[in-house]
Structure formats: structure tokens, C-alpha cells
Amino acid sequence: MSASKSSSVRLFNMACFIVMMVGLPFWVWYCLISVLHYDGSLVIPDAAFWSHIATPTLEALGFYLGWLLLQASLYHWLPGKPEQGQPLPDGSRLEYRLNGLRSFIISIGLWAALHFSGLLPGDYIYRNIEALVSTANIVVFAMCFYIYFLGRRQATAEERQFNFLEAFFVGAARNPRNGRFDWKFFCESRPGLTFWVIIGLSCAVHQYETHGVVTNAMWLICGLISLYIVDYYVNEDAILTTWDIIHEPFGWMLCWGSLIYVPFFYPLSAIWLANHPYELPGWGAAGILLLGVSGYVIFRQANIQKHRFRQGAGKKIWGKEPTFIQTAKGTKLLTSGWWGIASHANYLGDLMMALAMGLTVGFNTVFGYGYFLAFVVLLLHRDWRDNKHCVEKYGEDWKTYRKQVRWHIIPGIY
Ligand code: NDP
């Protein structure tokens, strides 16, 4: 690529970063306001619409900081299994403490104890979600500055080539750490994911207390979210072989995504259901359950097959010894199980689960499908980026893999 072309690509990227950092918080507000104040209709926002953006409050600040502190303390202090990450470019490995399931159980237990003791209503988060999202955005932006400065100190020579905007948005370093406190692992796997479950539960409590019922749609959405997150913690070690942990620097993109986008945008169907006690027909509920559980099985099997294979656990896949391509880079590319069917069948399973979550609102609001639709875009982009990464890293070996495994996500279609 010529110097002028590469600098114009860089400029274009930076313009995109700014648009995303300004636009995405407004996108989340837009969706929340539409669901909370306009029955989940698609509206063209005017001044009255935007006046619903809540101002941050001290109470929300106390609550959100308390939440982050609780999660950080649990992450740091709770005992857990130590596990080595994948080798870094310099050959070293970082150690991670896997105590996510314990931390999750304590957090949910605390939420239930506060609710049943009457100290804090179970639907507190739902009722204060607007002030919380405004406040959380400010806290997360501030955190990103801290992570930026920390990352700059820990960056490799290659990472120091990033200018301020690139380093702030994409990440100044791959694994910014204070001692053994790993900011990327913590933010990705703790406060946002557990909050997603608690927001779902908070919506269920609100539906019950306002409408006197918890509908089958609400049971389904809370069940599917919980399945996804509990599974995540049960298989926490598998996160260590995912793209984000291995390859991504940690900056605004991942931090804001994990702490705002996941907990405030992903549960839009539960948020809509909180005030719309929609009951699915029995066949509809059964179909959604089937779709969600099938997606879960594909997602889990695909991820665990690659993880065990890469960890060298020597496990059979679907009753047979795993087949693979030995690359010139030294790593092996699995060609059996789901990895012999599509290069990202794990994304297919994830998308099926997201669609099942969307379907819980029937066809009553497009915002119920927000997570699914945004996820399609995110995973298609990831697939494209990951393919590019593998082409560059593996060259001819990736071509050989591609000859054997033609499909990217949906066998026979894409
Ligand atoms: P993958 O877990 O699919 O990891 C991709 C990496 O695996 C590649 O970069 C490559 O790394 C390695 N790899 C590629 N092909 C093979 C092969 N045939 N055999 C062995 N290793 C291979 O990607 P993600 O981290 O993107 O996704 C992990 C899970 O997380 C998915 O299920 C995804 O859906 C989910 N996810 C969920 C999100 C959410 O918001 N809910 C967001 C993002 C992801 P290497 O260089 O080491 O070879």
C-alpha cells in the first residue's frame, strides 16, 4: 500500500472512531428512550425525544461505582483456579485467575438478598436505568482515559506507533495490568455480563410488581440470558483462547462495548417486556426454546472443541481423533468437529441464541431484535477481520484450510 493510501486509510479510520465514540452512546439512548417512552416504536427523534436523556445523578454514580468496586474486589480477592493465557508475541504467558462463577453466584445472591430483605427493590435497576446509563457512560469514558495512560506505559514498541486517537479507541496496549489485575479480562468478563443478567431479573421483578404476572416470554428471555452467562463462567478458561483476549489491544472499543453496550443494549427485549406483559403462544415459546438451546449447543461445542484442541488436551471430537493442518507458524488448525464444517460455526450458534432472545417479543417491537441485528453486523465484521488475520498469519496454510472448509458461518449459505 502506498504511503498516501495508507495515511488516507488511517484518517478514515480515525474519523470512524470519532463517529462511533459520539454516535454509539446516542444510539443506546435512542433505543432505550424508544422502548421506555414510545412503546418500542421506531420514531424520528425530535427535541422532545432527546429531552428524555436523563442527567447523571449522584445516586446512580454511587450505585455504579459500588457495582464496579464489588466486581473488582470479587475478581481480585476470591480464590480461583490459576490458568496460563496463550503465548504472547514475545513467548511469555500471562496468568489469569478464574473465579467468575463464584463471583457471579455471590453477585446474584446479593441482588436476591437485597430484594427479599426489602433493602433494595429487585427492579431498582430497571426503574433507574436512564440515570444509570448516563452516569455509567461518564464513568466508562473516565476509565478509558486511565486505561489509555496505563496502556501507554506498558505498550510494546509496535503499539507505541499508535497516535492518541488510535491508542485511545483501539487500545494503547494489549493487556494493561495493575499487578495481576488485568483490565481487559476484568471488564470483558465481569461487570457488564453479570449486569446483563441482573437487568433481565430486574425487568422480571418489575413486570411482576406492575402487572402481577411473569409471562412466558419474560421467563424465556431471562432463562436464555442466564444460560449464556452461566455457561460463560462455567467455561471461563475457554475465554483465554478467544480473539479478544489473544489479539485485541484494550481501549475504548472493548471497554465501552463490555460495560455499556452489553448490559444496556443487549437486554432491550427484557426491558420492553417489563412494561408489556406479552404472553407467547405455547408453540411459539417451544420453538424459541428449541432455537435457543440448539444455538447454545453449537456455540458451546464449537468453542470448547477449539479450546481443548489448542490446550493440547488430546480429547476426541465426536468420537474420533481430531484432524488438523500443521501450519508453518507452528500452531495447528483444527479441521474436525464444527471447525471442519465452517470456520466460525461458533458465531452461528451465538446468532441463533440472539435470534431466540429477540423472538421473545414476538413481532411487537423491532428493538427486541436490536441485539440480534447488531450482532449480525458485529460477527460478520469479526469474521472478515479474523479471516484477514488468518490469511496474513498463515498464508498458504490458510488457503489449504479454506479448501477443506469453504463455509464461514452458515454451511451451504455463507
Ligand atoms: P474465535 O474463538 O473463533 O477465535 C478466532 C481465532 O481462532 C483465530 O484468530 C485463530 O487464532 C484461531 N483459529 C481460527 N481457525 C482455527 C482453527 N480451524 N483451529 C484452531 N484455531 C483456529 O473468535 P472470537 O474470539 O471472535 O469468538 C469466540 C466466541 O465469542 C464466539 O462464540 C463468538 O460468537 C463470541 N462472541 C460474543 C460476543 C458477544 O458480545 N456476545 C462478542 C464477540 C464474540 P490464532 O491466531 O491463534 O490461530
Image (spheres, helix red, strand yellow):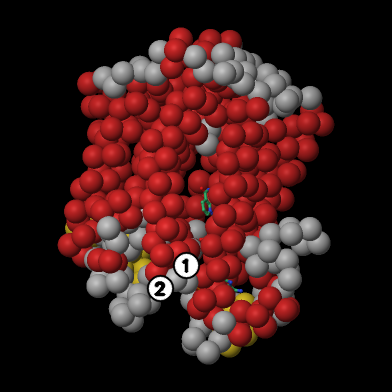
Residue that appears at 61% across and 79% down? 398
Q: CA distance from mark 2 to mark 1?
A: 7 Å
Asked if the residue at label 2 sits under 8 Å from ligand 1, the reply is: yes
Residue 237 image offset from top left, x and y in percent: 44, 63
> What residue is shown at x 23% (from left), y 46% (from top)?
145
Query: Residue 170, how many percent across, how many down?
Result: 36, 55
Q: Is residue 145 above or below residue 238?
A: above
The residue indicated by pointer 2 is 86
Pointers 2 and 1 in contact (C-beta within 8 Å): yes
Amino acid type shown at disc 2: Gln
Expressed as whole percent of the image width and height from the top left, the position of residue 42 reads: 61, 21
Q: Is residue 157 found left or right of 44 in the rendered image?
A: left
Q: Quadrant of residue 132?
A: top left
How packed mark 2 is, by other alpha carbons closer than 10 Å (few <14, some 14-19, many 20 or more), is some
Q: Who's the residue at 74% across and 59% down the image? A: 414
Q: Residues within 10 Å of mark 1 (few under 14, many from 20)?
A: some
Against 329, residue 344 (above or below) is: above
Q: Which residue is mark 1?
A: 241
Q: Using the image as rendered, state which of residue 61 and residue 55 is in the foreground.
A: 55
Residue at 56%, 86% in the rendered image: 327
Residue 248 location, quadrant: bottom left
Position of residue 261 measured from the top left corner of the image (x, y, whole percent): 45, 38
